[in-house]
Image: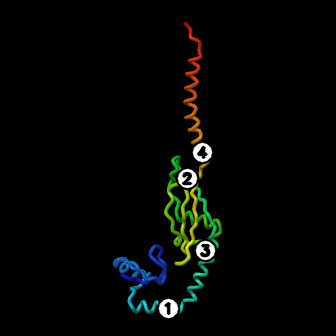
Amino acid sequence: MEIILKEDIIGLGYKNDIVNVKSGYGRNYLIPQGKGVIASPMAKKILAENLKQQAHKLAALKAEAEKKAEALNGVALEIAAKVSATGQLYGSVGVNQVTEELKKLGHEVDRKIITMKDAKTVGDFVALVHFHKEVTVEIPVKVVAENAEELKAAKAEAKAVKEEAPVAEVEAEVEEAEAPVEE
């Protein structure tokens, strides 16, 4: 079923796009919610005429989106999260945390236009910000351990204990060998 979208729907399309959707999704959700109309030949003609008339407005919207994207260019986020000793996060880092970090840096971005796979481990991830159908910004997100120093200290301590144990055993054997034998 072909539908003309009346608003942006992340994952499906942008306003004035003609998209193919399953009949049930179109009939039961998009059309009743006012998010789309059936793409009949007459509706397509009306859409084409409206796009011709709104070309300068669309260019202005795209220019505004590019300006917002330029402000986010070069921004890299580092998000601290609680991590277990194995490097697994307690919970996950997602769109909400990215939005909060951007707000702290002075960039007001709606969380609905950001897509990101939830981060469940420490590492590097990418968040996509969709300002316009032709303007998308990639923001690198680095998830780090909130208690990194404690984890490093615990690992170093465990390693030291492992190294000391064999050394102590060897020293005990050497002392026994060097000890004078009493007869």
Distance of mark 4 from mark 1, alpha carbons? 61 Å
- Determine the image quadrant of residue 76: bottom right
Residue 109, horizontal then vertical, whole percent: 58, 71
Residue 150 against residue 179 in the figure, above or below: below
Q: Is residue 113 left or right of residue 35?
A: right
Dot 2 falls on a residue whose secondary structure is loop
Name which residue lies at 57% across and 42% down: 155
Q: Nearer the viewer, mark 1 or mark 2?
A: 1
Q: Earlier in the sequence, mark 4 or mark 3?
A: 3
Q: Distance between the Cα atoms at labels 2 and 3?
A: 31 Å
Left of 34 or right of it: where is 105? right
Pointer 1 local density, CA inside 10 Å: few below 14, some 14–19, many at least 20:
few
Disc 1 target residue: 50
Closer to viewer: mark 2 or mark 3: 3
Q: Amino acid at mark 1?
A: Asn
Do the residues under discs 2 and 4 have CB atoms within 8 angstroms? no
First reached walking from the N terminus: tag 2 or tag 4 = 2
Q: In the rendered image, which residue does mark 2 sit on? A: 82
Describe the element under mark 1 as helix, strand or loop: helix
Position of residue 172 relative to residue 129, above or below, is above
* Mark 3, residue position: 69
Residue that badge 4 annotates:
152
Q: Is residue 71 above or below residue 40?
A: above
The residue at the point 54 percent across, 90 percent down is 54
The amino acid beneath tag 3 is Ala
